[in-house]
Image: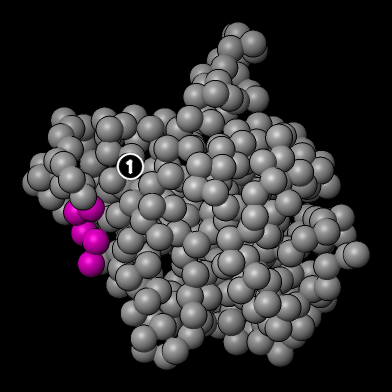
C-alpha cells in the first residue's frame, strides 16, 4: 500500500501514553443493550420521519433491527447507552455504526443515508464521551466502528459458481471510505475496523482509511480486530491469527486483536498466538460466552471478567472490552479484573 507520508494525529500520542500506563478499556455490546429497550418498528423508523442533519430519508423497507438508524431516530437512547458504558469504566466508546455502509444499508433501502448515519453516530458517541468526562474528569475516546458488511470479497456465496463474488474490492473501498469520512466529520478520534471474517474486506477498509487520511491531512489511530469463527482457529476466509497479522501489519495499527464469535475461554489460544507475533498493542473483546439455544448469552459479568482478567495476568493484552452479550456490568467487572495488571509489553 502506498505510504502517503502523513503525520499522526495528536490523539495517537495521547492514546499511546495512556496505554503505556495501564490496560485500556473498550465498551461492550450496543446491540445487547438496544434489545433491552424493546423498541417497535415505529421507534426505529420514527413513523417514517427519518431526518438526517440536512435532509429527510424515506424508505418503504421495514426498519426494525436496523440498529444504526437509531442514531437518527432515537439519539438520546443511544447516547445513554454510550454514557452507561463510559461510566462503567470504558476509555473508548464505539460508535453505533456497525452496519453503516451503503452495502449493508441496502437491506433497509437507506443507501442514501450513510453520511448522515455516520456523522450522527460519531456525534452521539462524542456527546456521551464529553458528558462522562464532565462527570468524572476522565478523558474518553470515540472509535468510529466499521463493520465487515454482509458480503465477502474472497468467497463465493454460490456453491455452484466458485468464481462468483457478490462484491468487489473497489465497491468495498468506496463504501468504507464514505462511512469513514462521515465518522471523522462527526468527531471520531480513531477508526476501528472490526469483526473481520474476510481479510480482503479488511484490506479494502484499510486502503479506504488511508485515502481518507490523505484527504484530511493526518493519520488517525487504526484499531483492527478479526474474528475466529470456529474451533479451526481460523477466520472465515481461512487465515490463522499469525497470517491475519501479517496481512494487516503494513497498516501499522494502533491495536490488532480479536473480537466476537468466541467467548473469552475459547478465544484465549488464538489471542496468545496473535500476541506472540504482533509488534503492536493487542486488543481483545470477546462475547459473554457462546450463545444459548435462544441466541442469548448466559456468562455473568464475574465469569467473563475472570477470563479476561486471565488475559491481563498473563501479559497478553493492552486493550480489553466486550462484544455480544456484554453489558455495562460486564465492562465494570472487566475493568476491575484487569486493573492490578500491567499492560502487555510490545516486542521490540
For this orientation, the residue located farthest to the right is 348
Counting from the top left corner in percent of width and height, residue 163 is at 64, 11
Q: Is residue 147 left or right of residue 19?
A: left
Closest to the observer: 250 or 65?
A: 250
Closest to the observer: 218 or 92?
A: 218
Q: Is residue 191 above or below residue 58?
A: below
- For disc 1, the neighbor class at 10 Å (few under 14, some 14 to 19, many from 20) is many
Q: What SS does tag 1 mark?
A: helix
Asked whether 132 falls inside the magenta stretch, the response is no
Q: Residue at x 38, y 47 (%)?
A: 182
Answer whether residue 328 is visible to the viewer in this image: no
Q: Residue at x 76, y 83 (%)?
A: 342
Answer whether residue 25 is visible to the viewer in this image: yes
Q: Which residue is mark 1?
A: 115
Q: Which segment is the magenta one?
A: 72-76
Counting from the top left corner in percent of width and height, residue 197 is at 63, 40
Image quarter of the N terminus: top right
Residue 339 figure quarter: bottom right
Q: Residue at x 16, y 30 (%)?
A: 60
Q: Is residue 292 left or right of residue 159?
A: left
Type of secondary structure dominating the magenta stretch: helix
Q: Residue at x 81, y 43 (%)?
A: 246
Residue 18 figure quarter: bottom right
Q: Is residue 241 above or below residue 318?
A: above
Counting from the top left corner in percent of width and height, residue 257 is at 69, 57
Here the colouring is one colour
Q: Is residue 100 above or below residue 333?
A: above
Counting from the top left corner in percent of width and height, residue 238 is at 74, 34
Asked whether 73 falls inside the magenta stretch, the response is yes
Closest to the observer: 68 or 287?
A: 68
Amino acid at each position: 500500500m502506498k505510504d502517503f507520508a502523513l503525520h499522526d494525529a495528536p490523539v495517537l500520542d495521547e492514546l499511546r501514553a495512556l496505554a503505556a500506563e495501564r490496560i485500556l478499556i473498550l465498551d461492550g455490546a450496543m446491540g445487547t443493550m438496544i434489545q433491552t429497550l424493546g423498541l417497535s418498528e415505529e421507534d426505529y423508523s420514527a413513523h417514517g420521519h427519518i431526518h438526517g442533519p440536512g435532509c429527510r430519508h424515506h424508505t418503504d423497507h421495514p426498519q426494525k433491527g436496523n440498529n444504526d438508524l437509531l442514531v437518527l431516530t432515537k439519539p438520546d437512547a443511544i447516547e445513554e447507552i454510550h454514557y452507561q458504558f463510559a461510566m462503567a469504566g470504558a476509555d473508548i466508546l464505539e460508535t453505533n455504526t456497525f452496519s453503516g455502509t451503503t452495502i449493508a444499508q441496502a437491506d433497509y433501502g437507506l443507501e442514501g443515508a450513510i453520511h448522515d448515519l455516520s456523522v450522527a453516530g460519531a456525534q452521539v458517541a462524542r456527546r456521551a464521551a464529553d458528558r462522562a468526562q464532565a462527570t468524572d474528569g476522565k478523558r474518553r475516546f470515540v472509535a468510529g466502528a466499521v463493520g465487515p458488511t454482509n458480503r465477502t470479497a474472497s468467497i463465493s456465496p454460490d456453491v455452484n459458481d466458485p468464481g462468483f463474488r457478490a462484491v468487489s474490492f473497489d465497491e468495498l473501498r468506496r463504501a468504507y471510505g464514505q462511512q469513514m469520512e462521515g465518522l471523522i466529520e462527526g468527531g471520531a478520534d480513531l477508526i476501528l475496523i472490526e469483526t473481520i471474517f474476510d481479510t480482503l474486506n479488511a484490506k479494502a477498509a484499510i486502503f479506504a482509511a488511508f485515502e481518507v487520511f490523505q484527504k484530511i491531512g493526518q493519520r488517525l489511530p487504526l484499531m483492527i480486530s478479526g474474528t475466529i469463527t470456529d474451533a479451526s482457529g481460523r477466520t472465515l476466509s481461512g487465515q490463522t491469527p499469525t497470517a491475519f497479522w501479517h496481512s494487516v501489519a503494513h497498516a501499522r495499527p494502533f491495536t490488532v486483536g480479536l473480537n466476537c464469535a468466541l467467548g473469552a475461554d475459547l478465544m484465549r489460544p488464538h489471542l496468545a498466538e496473535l500476541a506472540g507475533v504482533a509488534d503492536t498493542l493487542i486488543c481483545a473483546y470477546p462475547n459473554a460466552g457462546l450463545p444459548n439455544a435462544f441466541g442469548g448469552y448466559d456468562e455473568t459479568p464475574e465469569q467473563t471478567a475472570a477470563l479476561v482478567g486471565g488475559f491481563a495476568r498473563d501479559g497478553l493484552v493492552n486493550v480489553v472490552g466486550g462484544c455480544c452479550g456484554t453489558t455495562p456490568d460486564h465492562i465494570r467487572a472487566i475493568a476491575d479484573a484487569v486493573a492490578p495488571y500491567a499492560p502487555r509489553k510490545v516486542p521490540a
